[in-house]
Image (cartoon, rainbow, N blue to C red):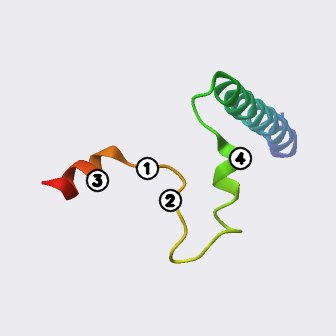
């Protein structure tokens, strides 16, 4: 087996692993959105609504409690 064959095998294996990881991440995002855990669509609006007085995408209850103290 030469270096050329080895590099081709490594390229195909690396591409396969990248495809599997990418599609697994897509399935994870889809399932978590369907379960209602996260709404990733509202994060896409951050770039469109980028004003200093815009409402936050989601509230952080920890920061609210620290401000009250």
Instruction: Determine the secondary structure under disc 1.
Output: loop
Residue 67 falls left or right of residue 41: left
Name the residue at 71% across, 68% down: 48
Crowding at dot 2, Cα within 10 Å, few <14 / some 14-19 / many 20+, comes out as few
In the image, which disc is placed on residue 56? 2
Name the residue at 33% across, 45% down: 61
Could you tell me how far apart the alpha carbons at marks 2 and 3 are, in whole angstroms?
Answer: 12 Å
- Residue 32 on image: x %, y %: 64, 27
Which image quadrant is residue 45 in?
A: bottom right
Name the residue at 87% across, 39% down: 5
Residue nearest the observer in this picture, 21 or 40: 40
Q: What residue does disc 3 label?
A: 63
Do residues under tags 4 and 1 come within 8 Å of each other at their CB atoms? no
Q: What residue does disc 4 label?
A: 41
Instruction: Determine the secondary structure under disc 4.
Output: helix
Q: What residue does disc 1 label?
A: 59
- Residue 68 on image: x %, y %: 18, 54
Do residues under tags 2 and 1 come within 8 Å of each other at their CB atoms? yes
Could you tell me how far apart the alpha carbons at marks 2 and 4 are, in whole angstroms?
Answer: 14 Å
Instruction: Determine the secondary structure under disc 3.
Output: helix
In the image, which disc is placed on residue 24? none
- Residue 8 on image: x %, y %: 86, 41
């Amino acid at each position: 087996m030469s270096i050329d064959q080895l590099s081709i095998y490594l390229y195909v294996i690396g591409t396969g692993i990248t495809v599997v990881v990418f599609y697994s991440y897509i399935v994870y995002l889809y399932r978590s959105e369907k379960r209602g855990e996260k709404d990733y669509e509202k994060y896409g609006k951050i770039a469109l609504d980028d004003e200093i007085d815009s409402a936050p995408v989601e509230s952080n209850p920890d920061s609210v409690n620290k401000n009250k103290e």
